[in-house]
Amino acid sequence: MTDALYGADLFSDFDRLQRQMTSLFGGFPSSIRAGRAGAFPAINIGTTDDSIEIVAFAPGLKQEDIEVTIDRGLLTISGERRPLWQDSMPEFRHYAQERFVGGFRRVVELPDSADPDKVQARYANGCLSVSVGKREASKPRAISVQ
């Protein structure tokens, strides 16, 4: 009875659905995965012929509060967001706090074309820009027809 309701291969149905959604919305290649929405810092991922570009929106941090690592095809952005005020400020009365405070970690799964030896990171104006170069073999090239 289960096969009649869901089909013989549920995973193949999910794969088909993912391909349809990707083609419908023009998503990223399935090998670039970022995680859930609403996590801190928010990230955008894009690609060029030469690189994979990741922008993490992390306002209110200092450059030394951010760590970027790459290992086995996983790019990790981690650090700590400190409170704006200190507990040693007795004159300050705390009523509400909507700004996230504490440690954070985001992991981006990179495609096989990513070259871990070609990574650059820059933090300015609350945005962390990470550029991961692509391997030469994965770059598009023209083939002469004879």
Image (cartoon, rainbow, N blue to C red):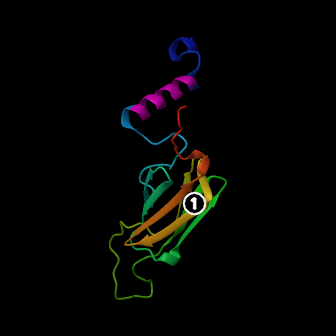
Q: Residue at x 39, y 88 (%)?
A: 90
Residue at the extreme right: 72
**Spot occupied by residue 145 in the image (x, y as percentages of width and height):** 53, 32
Where the C terminus falls, by quadrant? top right
Task: Find disc 1 in the rendering and name its residue.
Answer: 76
Q: Can residue 18 be found in the magenta stretch?
A: yes
Is residue 103 visible from the viewing direction of this image? no
Secondary structure state at the residue bearing disc 1: strand
50 w.r.t. 140: above or below: below
Mark 1: give few (<14), some (14-19) or many (20+) Cα within 10 Å. Answer: some
Provide the residue span drawn in magenta: 12-23
Q: Residue at x 52, y 23 (%)?
A: 13
Where the N terminus falls, by quadrant? top right
Q: Magenta segment, principal secondary structure?
A: helix
The amino acid sitting under disc 1 is Thr
Q: Can residue 133 be found in the magenta stretch?
A: no
121 w.r.t. 17: above or below: below
Q: Residue at x 60, y 64 (%)?
A: 69
